[in-house]
Amino acid sequence: MIRHIHAKRRTTISTALYVVRGAYGTLLLASPTWVSGRLLHVRLGTRGQGVARVLGARQLIQALVSGRVPGYPVLALGVEVDLLHAASMLALALARGRRRPALTDALIASAFALAGALAARQAAHEPPPQPGNGMQELRQKWASRIAAACVPGYLANPVRAHTE
């Protein structure tokens, strides 16, 4: 019963992250000027719209690759990607005159990283989700391999090391 409740909570956090990230990416791809007008109260030029669409594509691809119920390695790698994105936006804000858009994007990437970290923390203490198809199994295997190389302390958890 308790395991079922924890699995449900992880599913809820992971699913919310999947839906919000996918919707945000889709909005940036479809209408970057609408999103920038709502978030920044600024109208983007042609170059800014292109950059926003690239960032939207990144968010949408990350949502699709992660899936609705990812395991720990997928979530941990997603957190690292979001933190790198936030750091690059902070560096851009310091280096160029476009502080407001860069800082806003850094804040959004940090929020995605926080949500991913919460979901990963929950997933770290649970067995990995059973893959529903070959693509999900391949995703989980590759994420585990990459996480072993990139995520500090990934194989330090003996439960996770033996189950994946």
Image (cartoon, helix red, strand yellow):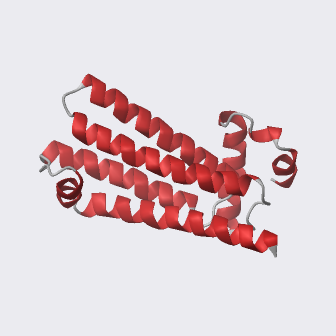
Residue, x 36% and y 59% (percent of image)? 25
153 displayed left or right of 162: left
What is the count of numbered marks?
0
Q: Position of residue 76 (x, y in %)?
A: 63, 46
Above or below, 32 against 9 in this view is: above
| x, y percent for residue 152 | 69, 33
Q: Taking 106 as reference, is 49 above or below it?
A: below
Could you tell me which residue is drawn at 43 percent across and 32 percent down?
87
In the picture, which quadrant includes the N terminus?
bottom right
Residue 121 is at least partly visible in this image: yes
Q: Which quadrant of the view contains residue 48?
A: top left
Looking at the image, which is closer to me, 23 or 144? 23
Q: Residue furthest bottom?
A: 1
Horizontal and vertical percent position of residue 11 = 63, 68
**Does 113 appear above or below 139?**
above
State whether residue 131 appears in this view.
no
- In the displayed structure image, the side of residue 61 where residue 36 appears, left or right: left
Is 11 displayed left or right of 45 in the figure?
right
Residue occupying image coordinates x 51% and y 47%: 113
Q: Is residue 127 above or below residue 3?
A: above
Q: Position of residue 78 (x, y in %)?
A: 55, 48
